[in-house]
Image (tube, coloured by chain):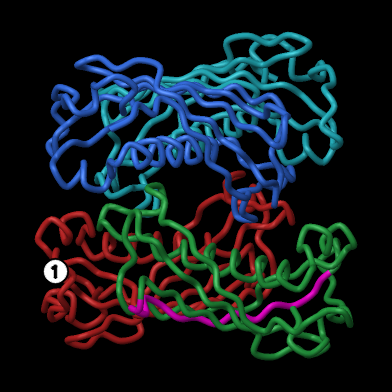
Chain colours: A red, B blue, C cyan, D green
Amino acid sequence: MEPAPSIEIEFRVRYAETDQMGFVHHANYLVYFEMGRVELLRARGLSYRDLEAQGFLLVVVKATVRYHKPARYDDLLRLRTTVTRVTAARIDHSYKLYRGDELLAEGETTLACVDRQGRVQRVPDFLREPGSA
Amino acid sequence: MEPAPSIEIEFRVRYAETDQMGFVHHANYLVYFEMGRVELLRARGLSYRDLEAQGFLLVVVKATVRYHKPARYDDLLRLRTTVTRVTAARIDHSYKLYRGDELLAEGETTLACVDRQGRVQRVPDFLREPGSA
Amino acid sequence: MEPAPSIEIEFRVRYAETDQMGFVHHANYLVYFEMGRVELLRARGLSYRDLEAQGFLLVVVKATVRYHKPARYDDLLRLRTTVTRVTAARIDHSYKLYRGDELLAEGETTLACVDRQGRVQRVPDFLREPGSA
Amino acid sequence: MEPAPSIEIEFRVRYAETDQMGFVHHANYLVYFEMGRVELLRARGLSYRDLEAQGFLLVVVKATVRYHKPARYDDLLRLRTTVTRVTAARIDHSYKLYRGDELLAEGETTLACVDRQGRVQRVPDFLREPGSA
Protein backbone atom coordinates (compact mmCIF):
# COMPACT_ATOMS: atom_id res chain seq x y z
CA MET A 1 0.00 0.00 0.00
CA GLU A 2 1.44 3.33 -1.05
CA PRO A 3 1.63 6.11 1.47
CA ALA A 4 -1.09 8.68 0.82
CA PRO A 5 -0.64 11.32 3.49
CA SER A 6 -2.54 13.91 1.54
CA ILE A 7 -5.42 14.00 -0.91
CA GLU A 8 -7.52 16.51 -2.78
CA ILE A 9 -11.22 16.24 -3.47
CA GLU A 10 -13.48 18.53 -5.45
CA PHE A 11 -17.15 19.12 -4.85
CA ARG A 12 -19.82 21.70 -5.46
CA VAL A 13 -21.59 23.71 -2.77
CA ARG A 14 -25.22 22.63 -2.41
CA TYR A 15 -28.04 25.13 -2.06
CA ALA A 16 -29.08 23.60 1.26
CA GLU A 17 -25.61 24.37 2.65
CA THR A 18 -26.06 28.14 2.37
CA ASP A 19 -27.67 30.36 4.98
CA GLN A 20 -29.46 33.66 4.64
CA MET A 21 -26.18 35.59 4.59
CA GLY A 22 -25.70 34.02 1.18
CA PHE A 23 -22.64 32.05 2.31
CA VAL A 24 -22.06 28.42 3.22
CA HIS A 25 -23.10 27.99 6.86
CA HIS A 26 -19.94 27.61 8.92
CA ALA A 27 -20.95 24.24 10.44
CA ASN A 28 -20.81 22.61 7.00
CA TYR A 29 -17.04 22.96 6.81
CA LEU A 30 -16.79 20.15 9.36
CA VAL A 31 -18.92 18.02 7.06
CA TYR A 32 -16.55 18.81 4.19
CA PHE A 33 -13.52 17.90 6.32
CA GLU A 34 -15.14 14.56 7.13
CA MET A 35 -15.56 13.88 3.41
CA GLY A 36 -11.87 14.59 2.98
CA ARG A 37 -10.90 12.07 5.67
CA VAL A 38 -13.10 9.38 4.15
CA GLU A 39 -11.59 9.83 0.69
CA LEU A 40 -8.06 9.87 2.11
CA LEU A 41 -8.75 6.46 3.63
CA ARG A 42 -10.24 5.22 0.37
CA ALA A 43 -7.15 6.36 -1.53
CA ARG A 44 -5.21 3.97 0.72
CA GLY A 45 -7.55 1.12 -0.09
CA LEU A 46 -9.42 1.42 3.19
CA SER A 47 -13.10 2.03 3.71
CA TYR A 48 -14.32 3.86 6.79
CA ARG A 49 -17.54 1.86 6.44
CA ASP A 50 -15.56 -1.38 6.82
CA LEU A 51 -13.55 0.08 9.68
CA GLU A 52 -16.78 0.75 11.57
CA ALA A 53 -18.09 -2.71 10.71
CA GLN A 54 -14.91 -4.12 12.33
CA GLY A 55 -15.62 -2.14 15.49
CA PHE A 56 -13.15 0.73 15.02
CA LEU A 57 -15.07 3.98 15.37
CA LEU A 58 -13.12 7.17 14.75
CA VAL A 59 -14.62 10.02 16.77
CA VAL A 60 -13.67 13.68 16.56
CA VAL A 61 -12.34 14.87 19.91
CA LYS A 62 -11.18 18.29 18.75
CA ALA A 63 -11.85 20.47 15.72
CA THR A 64 -10.71 23.94 14.75
CA VAL A 65 -11.72 25.94 11.68
CA ARG A 66 -10.39 29.32 10.55
CA TYR A 67 -12.70 30.96 8.00
CA HIS A 68 -10.86 33.38 5.71
CA LYS A 69 -13.34 34.03 2.89
CA PRO A 70 -16.89 32.80 2.47
CA ALA A 71 -17.74 29.91 0.16
CA ARG A 72 -20.92 30.44 -1.85
CA TYR A 73 -23.66 28.40 -3.47
CA ASP A 74 -22.57 26.46 -6.56
CA ASP A 75 -18.87 27.18 -5.95
CA LEU A 76 -16.61 24.37 -7.05
CA LEU A 77 -14.43 23.78 -4.00
CA ARG A 78 -11.20 21.86 -3.62
CA LEU A 79 -10.27 20.41 -0.25
CA ARG A 80 -6.77 19.21 0.61
CA THR A 81 -6.73 16.82 3.57
CA THR A 82 -3.46 15.76 5.18
CA VAL A 83 -2.58 13.35 7.97
CA THR A 84 -0.21 15.27 10.21
CA ARG A 85 0.33 12.81 13.07
CA VAL A 86 -0.72 9.31 14.09
CA THR A 87 -0.08 7.85 17.54
CA ALA A 88 -1.55 4.90 19.41
CA ALA A 89 -4.17 7.27 20.82
CA ARG A 90 -4.80 9.96 18.21
CA ILE A 91 -4.95 10.79 14.51
CA ASP A 92 -4.45 14.41 13.50
CA HIS A 93 -5.49 15.87 10.16
CA SER A 94 -5.17 19.32 8.65
CA TYR A 95 -7.37 20.82 5.93
CA LYS A 96 -7.15 23.57 3.37
CA LEU A 97 -10.25 24.53 1.41
CA TYR A 98 -9.82 26.39 -1.88
CA ARG A 99 -11.93 27.96 -4.60
CA GLY A 100 -9.51 28.06 -7.51
CA ASP A 101 -6.34 29.50 -5.96
CA GLU A 102 -8.12 31.32 -3.16
CA LEU A 103 -7.71 29.79 0.28
CA LEU A 104 -11.17 30.00 1.87
CA ALA A 105 -10.65 28.11 5.12
CA GLU A 106 -8.20 25.99 7.07
CA GLY A 107 -8.66 23.62 9.93
CA GLU A 108 -7.38 20.78 12.07
CA THR A 109 -9.05 17.84 13.72
CA THR A 110 -7.99 15.21 16.23
CA LEU A 111 -9.65 11.81 16.13
CA ALA A 112 -9.66 9.09 18.74
CA CYS A 113 -10.56 5.45 18.21
CA VAL A 114 -13.41 4.04 20.29
CA ASP A 115 -15.37 0.79 20.31
CA ARG A 116 -19.16 0.42 19.96
CA GLN A 117 -19.57 1.18 23.67
CA GLY A 118 -17.64 4.40 23.30
CA ARG A 119 -14.54 3.10 25.14
CA VAL A 120 -11.22 4.43 23.87
CA GLN A 121 -9.06 1.81 22.18
CA ARG A 122 -5.67 1.86 20.44
CA VAL A 123 -5.59 3.17 16.91
CA PRO A 124 -5.24 -0.07 14.89
CA ASP A 125 -1.77 -0.70 13.47
CA PHE A 126 -2.87 -0.65 9.84
CA LEU A 127 -3.84 2.99 10.35
CA ARG A 128 -0.46 3.78 11.90
CA GLU A 129 1.78 2.87 9.00
CA PRO A 130 3.74 5.73 7.43
CA GLY A 131 1.43 8.13 5.69
CA SER A 132 -1.63 6.21 6.69
CA ALA A 133 -5.07 7.03 8.13
CA MET B 1 -53.29 6.78 29.54
CA GLU B 2 -55.39 9.54 27.99
CA PRO B 3 -55.80 9.66 24.25
CA ALA B 4 -53.57 12.38 22.78
CA PRO B 5 -54.23 12.27 19.06
CA SER B 6 -52.94 15.78 18.56
CA ILE B 7 -50.30 18.02 20.10
CA GLU B 8 -48.80 21.45 19.55
CA ILE B 9 -45.16 22.35 19.99
CA GLU B 10 -43.47 25.73 19.67
CA PHE B 11 -39.92 26.35 18.57
CA ARG B 12 -37.79 29.04 17.03
CA VAL B 13 -36.20 28.89 13.57
CA ARG B 14 -32.42 28.51 13.80
CA TYR B 15 -30.07 30.51 11.62
CA ALA B 16 -28.55 27.32 10.24
CA GLU B 17 -31.98 26.29 8.93
CA THR B 18 -32.21 29.20 6.50
CA ASP B 19 -30.84 29.22 2.99
CA GLN B 20 -29.66 32.07 0.81
CA MET B 21 -33.22 32.88 -0.26
CA GLY B 22 -33.68 34.08 3.32
CA PHE B 23 -36.27 31.38 4.07
CA VAL B 24 -36.14 28.11 5.96
CA HIS B 25 -34.78 25.47 3.58
CA HIS B 26 -37.67 23.23 2.59
CA ALA B 27 -36.01 20.00 3.77
CA ASN B 28 -36.10 21.22 7.38
CA TYR B 29 -39.88 20.93 7.52
CA LEU B 30 -39.46 17.16 7.65
CA VAL B 31 -37.16 17.62 10.65
CA TYR B 32 -39.83 19.75 12.32
CA PHE B 33 -42.50 17.13 11.63
CA GLU B 34 -40.29 14.51 13.26
CA MET B 35 -40.01 16.68 16.37
CA GLY B 36 -43.79 16.86 16.45
CA ARG B 37 -44.13 13.06 16.33
CA VAL B 38 -41.61 12.61 19.14
CA GLU B 39 -43.42 15.06 21.41
CA LEU B 40 -46.79 13.50 20.59
CA LEU B 41 -45.43 10.17 21.83
CA ARG B 42 -43.98 11.83 24.91
CA ALA B 43 -47.34 13.43 25.71
CA ARG B 44 -48.68 9.85 25.88
CA GLY B 45 -45.96 8.83 28.29
CA LEU B 46 -43.94 7.07 25.58
CA SER B 47 -40.39 7.77 24.55
CA TYR B 48 -39.28 7.12 21.00
CA ARG B 49 -35.80 6.51 22.40
CA ASP B 50 -37.15 3.65 24.52
CA LEU B 51 -39.19 2.34 21.59
CA GLU B 52 -36.01 2.04 19.54
CA ALA B 53 -34.18 0.45 22.46
CA GLN B 54 -36.94 -2.20 22.48
CA GLY B 55 -36.37 -2.87 18.79
CA PHE B 56 -39.32 -0.97 17.32
CA LEU B 57 -37.97 1.39 14.69
CA LEU B 58 -40.47 3.71 13.06
CA VAL B 59 -39.34 4.57 9.53
CA VAL B 60 -40.91 7.10 7.20
CA VAL B 61 -42.20 5.40 4.07
CA LYS B 62 -43.99 8.39 2.60
CA ALA B 63 -43.92 12.13 3.22
CA THR B 64 -45.71 15.05 1.59
CA VAL B 65 -45.27 18.74 2.33
CA ARG B 66 -47.23 21.66 0.90
CA TYR B 67 -45.43 24.98 1.42
CA HIS B 68 -47.82 27.93 1.53
CA LYS B 69 -45.70 30.77 2.93
CA PRO B 70 -42.02 30.82 3.84
CA ALA B 71 -40.85 30.54 7.45
CA ARG B 72 -37.97 32.84 8.29
CA TYR B 73 -35.04 33.01 10.67
CA ASP B 74 -35.99 33.61 14.31
CA ASP B 75 -39.71 33.06 13.64
CA LEU B 76 -41.51 31.46 16.54
CA LEU B 77 -43.34 28.56 14.90
CA ARG B 78 -46.16 26.40 16.17
CA LEU B 79 -46.60 22.88 14.83
CA ARG B 80 -49.76 20.86 15.29
CA THR B 81 -49.18 17.12 14.83
CA THR B 82 -52.11 14.70 14.62
CA VAL B 83 -52.36 10.93 14.36
CA THR B 84 -54.85 10.31 11.58
CA ARG B 85 -54.75 6.52 11.26
CA VAL B 86 -53.08 3.54 12.89
CA THR B 87 -53.20 0.01 11.47
CA ALA B 88 -51.11 -3.09 12.07
CA ALA B 89 -48.86 -1.97 9.24
CA ARG B 90 -48.86 1.83 9.20
CA ILE B 91 -49.13 5.00 11.29
CA ASP B 92 -50.32 8.15 9.53
CA HIS B 93 -49.79 11.67 10.85
CA SER B 94 -50.79 15.08 9.57
CA TYR B 95 -49.08 18.39 10.32
CA LYS B 96 -49.94 22.06 10.26
CA LEU B 97 -47.20 24.63 10.79
CA TYR B 98 -48.19 28.13 11.90
CA ARG B 99 -46.55 31.47 12.61
CA GLY B 100 -49.16 33.14 14.80
CA ASP B 101 -52.41 32.53 12.91
CA GLU B 102 -50.78 32.18 9.52
CA LEU B 103 -50.68 28.65 8.13
CA LEU B 104 -47.20 28.29 6.61
CA ALA B 105 -47.17 24.63 5.63
CA GLU B 106 -49.07 21.36 5.85
CA GLY B 107 -48.01 17.80 5.43
CA GLU B 108 -48.62 14.12 5.94
CA THR B 109 -46.36 11.19 6.67
CA THR B 110 -46.78 7.45 6.76
CA LEU B 111 -44.58 5.41 9.08
CA ALA B 112 -43.91 1.69 9.10
CA CYS B 113 -42.45 -0.33 11.94
CA VAL B 114 -39.25 -2.28 11.23
CA ASP B 115 -36.77 -4.22 13.34
CA ARG B 116 -33.02 -3.57 13.56
CA GLN B 117 -32.48 -5.57 10.36
CA GLY B 118 -34.96 -3.37 8.53
CA ARG B 119 -37.65 -6.08 8.32
CA VAL B 120 -41.21 -4.86 8.54
CA GLN B 121 -43.02 -5.88 11.73
CA ARG B 122 -46.48 -5.23 13.17
CA VAL B 123 -47.04 -1.87 14.79
CA PRO B 124 -46.97 -2.79 18.51
CA ASP B 125 -50.35 -2.89 20.23
CA PHE B 126 -49.55 -0.13 22.71
CA LEU B 127 -49.19 2.23 19.76
CA ARG B 128 -52.52 1.11 18.35
CA GLU B 129 -54.77 2.10 21.21
CA PRO B 130 -57.30 4.85 20.50
CA GLY B 131 -55.56 8.13 19.90
CA SER B 132 -52.14 6.64 20.27
CA ALA B 133 -48.83 6.80 18.37
CA MET C 1 -29.83 24.18 -26.92
CA GLU C 2 -30.80 20.53 -26.87
CA PRO C 3 -33.81 19.49 -24.86
CA ALA C 4 -32.69 17.76 -21.66
CA PRO C 5 -35.84 16.72 -19.90
CA SER C 6 -34.03 14.16 -17.80
CA ILE C 7 -30.60 13.78 -16.26
CA GLU C 8 -28.74 11.38 -14.00
CA ILE C 9 -26.24 12.34 -11.34
CA GLU C 10 -24.15 10.14 -9.09
CA PHE C 11 -22.98 10.97 -5.60
CA ARG C 12 -21.87 9.27 -2.44
CA VAL C 13 -23.78 9.33 0.87
CA ARG C 14 -21.97 11.43 3.46
CA TYR C 15 -21.55 10.29 7.04
CA ALA C 16 -23.31 13.41 8.31
CA GLU C 17 -26.40 12.42 6.30
CA THR C 18 -27.01 9.26 8.31
CA ASP C 19 -28.97 9.05 11.53
CA GLN C 20 -28.74 6.62 14.41
CA MET C 21 -30.88 4.06 12.61
CA GLY C 22 -27.90 3.65 10.32
CA PHE C 23 -29.80 4.96 7.28
CA VAL C 24 -29.80 8.28 5.44
CA HIS C 25 -32.12 10.61 7.35
CA HIS C 26 -35.28 11.01 5.27
CA ALA C 27 -35.07 14.82 5.05
CA ASN C 28 -31.85 14.55 3.02
CA TYR C 29 -33.69 13.11 0.03
CA LEU C 30 -35.10 16.57 -0.61
CA VAL C 31 -31.54 17.92 -0.63
CA TYR C 32 -30.60 15.25 -3.18
CA PHE C 33 -33.60 16.13 -5.36
CA GLU C 34 -32.50 19.78 -5.31
CA MET C 35 -29.05 18.75 -6.53
CA GLY C 36 -30.73 16.90 -9.39
CA ARG C 37 -32.71 19.98 -10.43
CA VAL C 38 -29.60 22.16 -10.39
CA GLU C 39 -27.66 19.74 -12.59
CA LEU C 40 -30.59 19.37 -14.96
CA LEU C 41 -30.52 23.14 -15.46
CA ARG C 42 -26.75 23.08 -15.93
CA ALA C 43 -27.06 20.37 -18.57
CA ARG C 44 -29.19 22.87 -20.51
CA GLY C 45 -26.54 25.56 -20.18
CA LEU C 46 -28.40 27.36 -17.39
CA SER C 47 -27.15 28.13 -13.93
CA TYR C 48 -29.58 28.37 -11.03
CA ARG C 49 -27.12 30.79 -9.43
CA ASP C 50 -27.49 33.14 -12.43
CA LEU C 51 -31.25 32.67 -12.42
CA GLU C 52 -31.41 33.91 -8.83
CA ALA C 53 -29.06 36.78 -9.63
CA GLN C 54 -31.56 37.81 -12.34
CA GLY C 55 -34.37 37.81 -9.77
CA PHE C 56 -36.01 34.48 -10.62
CA LEU C 57 -36.28 32.45 -7.44
CA LEU C 58 -37.64 28.93 -7.77
CA VAL C 59 -39.36 27.89 -4.56
CA VAL C 60 -40.70 24.47 -3.72
CA VAL C 61 -44.45 24.63 -3.13
CA LYS C 62 -45.06 20.90 -2.88
CA ALA C 63 -42.85 17.87 -2.35
CA THR C 64 -43.62 14.17 -2.01
CA VAL C 65 -41.18 11.35 -1.29
CA ARG C 66 -41.86 7.62 -1.20
CA TYR C 67 -39.10 5.70 0.58
CA HIS C 68 -38.82 2.10 -0.59
CA LYS C 69 -35.46 0.96 0.80
CA PRO C 70 -32.98 2.79 2.99
CA ALA C 71 -29.84 4.39 1.57
CA ARG C 72 -26.77 3.91 3.75
CA TYR C 73 -23.49 5.65 4.49
CA ASP C 74 -20.96 5.54 1.65
CA ASP C 75 -23.50 4.17 -0.84
CA LEU C 76 -22.94 5.39 -4.35
CA LEU C 77 -26.36 6.67 -5.39
CA ARG C 78 -27.74 7.53 -8.79
CA LEU C 79 -30.54 10.06 -9.10
CA ARG C 80 -32.65 10.47 -12.22
CA THR C 81 -34.41 13.85 -12.36
CA THR C 82 -37.06 14.56 -14.97
CA VAL C 83 -39.11 17.63 -15.86
CA THR C 84 -42.65 16.39 -16.16
CA ARG C 85 -44.58 19.62 -16.76
CA VAL C 86 -43.90 23.33 -17.18
CA THR C 87 -46.60 25.99 -17.20
CA ALA C 88 -46.55 29.74 -16.71
CA ALA C 89 -47.09 29.13 -13.00
CA ARG C 90 -45.40 25.85 -12.14
CA ILE C 91 -42.54 23.48 -12.88
CA ASP C 92 -43.00 19.83 -11.97
CA HIS C 93 -40.17 17.35 -11.59
CA SER C 94 -40.06 13.67 -10.75
CA TYR C 95 -37.18 11.76 -9.19
CA LYS C 96 -35.96 8.21 -8.95
CA LEU C 97 -33.09 7.35 -6.64
CA TYR C 98 -31.13 4.16 -7.25
CA ARG C 99 -28.30 2.17 -5.72
CA GLY C 100 -27.16 0.06 -8.62
CA ASP C 101 -30.41 -1.33 -10.02
CA GLU C 102 -32.34 -1.06 -6.77
CA LEU C 103 -34.92 1.71 -6.66
CA LEU C 104 -34.56 3.25 -3.19
CA ALA C 105 -36.94 6.18 -3.40
CA GLU C 106 -39.17 8.18 -5.71
CA GLY C 107 -40.60 11.63 -5.49
CA GLU C 108 -42.18 14.65 -7.11
CA THR C 109 -41.86 18.36 -6.54
CA THR C 110 -43.71 21.42 -7.77
CA LEU C 111 -41.82 24.69 -8.03
CA ALA C 112 -43.19 28.20 -8.37
CA CYS C 113 -41.27 31.27 -9.49
CA VAL C 114 -41.14 34.23 -7.10
CA ASP C 115 -39.24 37.50 -6.97
CA ARG C 116 -36.96 38.68 -4.15
CA GLN C 117 -40.02 39.90 -2.21
CA GLY C 118 -41.59 36.46 -2.45
CA ARG C 119 -44.28 37.54 -4.94
CA VAL C 120 -45.27 34.94 -7.48
CA GLN C 121 -44.20 35.73 -11.04
CA ARG C 122 -44.51 33.94 -14.38
CA VAL C 123 -42.02 31.17 -15.04
CA PRO C 124 -39.61 32.85 -17.50
CA ASP C 125 -40.00 31.76 -21.12
CA PHE C 126 -36.50 30.35 -21.43
CA LEU C 127 -37.47 27.81 -18.77
CA ARG C 128 -40.61 26.89 -20.67
CA GLU C 129 -39.06 25.69 -23.89
CA PRO C 130 -39.53 22.03 -24.71
CA GLY C 131 -37.62 19.88 -22.31
CA SER C 132 -36.43 22.80 -20.28
CA ALA C 133 -36.20 23.71 -16.57
CA MET D 1 -29.59 47.58 29.81
CA GLU D 2 -28.12 45.11 32.30
CA PRO D 3 -24.90 43.35 31.45
CA ALA D 4 -25.58 39.77 30.42
CA PRO D 5 -22.17 38.29 29.71
CA SER D 6 -23.39 34.74 30.10
CA ILE D 7 -26.59 32.83 29.49
CA GLU D 8 -27.86 29.27 29.66
CA ILE D 9 -30.29 27.67 27.26
CA GLU D 10 -31.81 24.21 27.33
CA PHE D 11 -32.86 22.17 24.34
CA ARG D 12 -33.42 18.60 23.31
CA VAL D 13 -31.34 16.67 20.76
CA ARG D 14 -33.31 16.04 17.57
CA TYR D 15 -33.26 12.69 15.83
CA ALA D 16 -31.98 14.29 12.64
CA GLU D 17 -28.91 15.52 14.53
CA THR D 18 -27.63 12.03 15.24
CA ASP D 19 -25.44 9.98 12.93
CA GLN D 20 -25.03 6.24 12.55
CA MET D 21 -22.61 6.08 15.48
CA GLY D 22 -25.65 6.85 17.61
CA PHE D 23 -24.23 10.19 18.75
CA VAL D 24 -24.93 13.80 17.77
CA HIS D 25 -22.90 14.53 14.65
CA HIS D 26 -20.00 16.77 15.63
CA ALA D 27 -20.88 19.57 13.17
CA ASN D 28 -24.14 20.23 15.04
CA TYR D 29 -22.30 21.60 18.06
CA LEU D 30 -21.55 24.72 16.00
CA VAL D 31 -25.28 25.07 15.35
CA TYR D 32 -25.93 24.80 19.09
CA PHE D 33 -23.28 27.44 19.84
CA GLU D 34 -24.98 29.78 17.36
CA MET D 35 -28.28 29.30 19.18
CA GLY D 36 -26.50 30.28 22.40
CA ARG D 37 -25.17 33.51 20.88
CA VAL D 38 -28.59 34.47 19.55
CA GLU D 39 -30.24 33.97 22.94
CA LEU D 40 -27.46 35.86 24.71
CA LEU D 41 -28.21 38.83 22.46
CA ARG D 42 -31.93 38.47 23.09
CA ALA D 43 -31.35 38.45 26.86
CA ARG D 44 -29.81 41.91 26.37
CA GLY D 45 -32.85 43.12 24.45
CA LEU D 46 -31.16 42.75 21.08
CA SER D 47 -32.27 40.69 18.14
CA TYR D 48 -29.74 39.27 15.72
CA ARG D 49 -32.46 39.44 13.07
CA ASP D 50 -32.71 43.22 13.57
CA LEU D 51 -28.93 43.54 13.63
CA GLU D 52 -28.75 41.95 10.19
CA ALA D 53 -31.59 44.12 8.95
CA GLN D 54 -29.50 47.13 10.00
CA GLY D 55 -26.57 45.84 7.96
CA PHE D 56 -24.43 44.38 10.75
CA LEU D 57 -23.60 40.79 9.85
CA LEU D 58 -21.67 38.79 12.42
CA VAL D 59 -19.58 36.13 10.70
CA VAL D 60 -17.61 33.37 12.38
CA VAL D 61 -13.91 33.71 11.59
CA LYS D 62 -12.67 31.03 13.95
CA ALA D 63 -14.27 28.17 15.83
CA THR D 64 -12.86 25.48 18.09
CA VAL D 65 -14.73 22.58 19.68
CA ARG D 66 -13.42 20.01 22.17
CA TYR D 67 -15.66 16.97 22.40
CA HIS D 68 -15.41 15.18 25.76
CA LYS D 69 -18.42 12.86 25.80
CA PRO D 70 -21.02 12.20 23.12
CA ALA D 71 -24.48 13.77 23.25
CA ARG D 72 -27.26 11.40 22.25
CA TYR D 73 -30.73 11.54 20.74
CA ASP D 74 -33.39 12.99 23.03
CA ASP D 75 -30.83 14.20 25.59
CA LEU D 76 -31.85 17.40 27.31
CA LEU D 77 -28.78 19.59 26.91
CA ARG D 78 -27.81 22.79 28.65
CA LEU D 79 -25.50 25.25 26.93
CA ARG D 80 -23.72 28.06 28.75
CA THR D 81 -22.57 30.83 26.38
CA THR D 82 -20.27 33.59 27.59
CA VAL D 83 -18.85 36.71 25.95
CA THR D 84 -15.17 36.66 26.77
CA ARG D 85 -13.86 39.67 24.83
CA VAL D 86 -15.21 42.44 22.62
CA THR D 87 -12.99 44.79 20.61
CA ALA D 88 -13.64 47.07 17.66
CA ALA D 89 -12.77 44.19 15.37
CA ARG D 90 -13.81 40.98 17.13
CA ILE D 91 -16.27 39.34 19.52
CA ASP D 92 -15.14 36.23 21.36
CA HIS D 93 -17.46 33.74 23.00
CA SER D 94 -16.88 30.57 24.96
CA TYR D 95 -19.28 27.66 25.36
CA LYS D 96 -19.85 24.79 27.75
CA LEU D 97 -22.37 22.09 26.86
CA TYR D 98 -23.79 19.93 29.66
CA ARG D 99 -26.11 16.99 30.12
CA GLY D 100 -27.08 17.33 33.75
CA ASP D 101 -23.75 17.92 35.50
CA GLU D 102 -21.68 16.17 32.86
CA LEU D 103 -19.60 18.46 30.67
CA LEU D 104 -19.97 17.07 27.14
CA ALA D 105 -18.15 19.68 25.08
CA GLU D 106 -16.48 23.07 25.20
CA GLY D 107 -15.63 25.57 22.55
CA GLU D 108 -14.71 29.07 21.52
CA THR D 109 -15.62 31.23 18.55
CA THR D 110 -14.42 34.56 17.20
CA LEU D 111 -16.85 36.70 15.24
CA ALA D 112 -16.14 39.65 12.98
CA CYS D 113 -18.63 42.23 11.80
CA VAL D 114 -19.10 42.64 8.04
CA ASP D 115 -21.52 44.54 5.81
CA ARG D 116 -23.76 43.04 3.12
CA GLN D 117 -20.83 43.08 0.66
CA GLY D 118 -18.72 41.09 3.11
CA ARG D 119 -16.43 44.04 3.97
CA VAL D 120 -15.18 44.12 7.54
CA GLN D 121 -16.62 46.96 9.62
CA ARG D 122 -16.24 48.06 13.24
CA VAL D 123 -18.26 46.15 15.79
CA PRO D 124 -21.09 48.62 16.58
CA ASP D 125 -20.76 50.45 19.90
CA PHE D 126 -23.99 49.06 21.33
CA LEU D 127 -22.40 45.60 21.12
CA ARG D 128 -19.26 46.83 22.89
CA GLU D 129 -20.78 47.94 26.17
CA PRO D 130 -19.73 45.99 29.26
CA GLY D 131 -21.00 42.49 29.12
CA SER D 132 -22.61 42.95 25.76
CA ALA D 133 -22.81 40.99 22.49
> In this view, which residue lies farthest toward the front?
B2
Q: Where is residue B78, by image quadrant? A: top right
Q: Quadrant of the N terminus of chain A?
A: bottom left
User: Is residue D17 found left or right of C117 in the rendered image?
Assistant: left
Q: Position of residue B42 (x, y in %)?
A: 35, 42
**Res B79 visible:** yes
Report which residue position mark 1 lands on: A115
Decide which of C29, B122 is in the foreground and name it: B122
The stretch drawn in magenta includes residue D109 = yes
**Res A93 visible:** no
What secondary structure is the magenta-colored segment mainly? Answer: strand
Q: Position of residue D11 (x, y in %)?
A: 48, 60
Which residue type carries mark 1? Asp
Residue at image point 68% right, 9% down: C130
Chain letter for mark 1, please: A
Up/down of C96 relative to B30, above or below: above
User: Is residue B79 found left or right of C115 in the rendered image?
Assistant: left
Q: Position of residue A104 (x, y in %)?
A: 63, 70
Q: Tag 1's secondary structure?
A: loop
Up/down of D109 relative to C12, above or below: below
Q: Position of residue A92 (x, y in %)?
A: 34, 82
Decide which of B59, A19 is in the foreground and name it: B59
Residue at image point 71% right, 44% down: B72
- Crowding near the residue tagged with mark 1, few <14, some 14–19, many ≥20 C-alpha atoms within 10 Å: some
User: Is residue D7 found left or right of A56 in the rendered image?
Assistant: right
User: Is residue A32 found left or right of B69 in the rendered image?
Assistant: left
Q: Quadrant of the C terminus of chain A?
A: bottom left
The stretch drawn in magenta includes residue C70 = no
Q: Where is residue C86, by image quadrant? A: top right
Up/down of C13 relative to A103, above or below: above
Q: Which residues are magenta?
A: D101-114
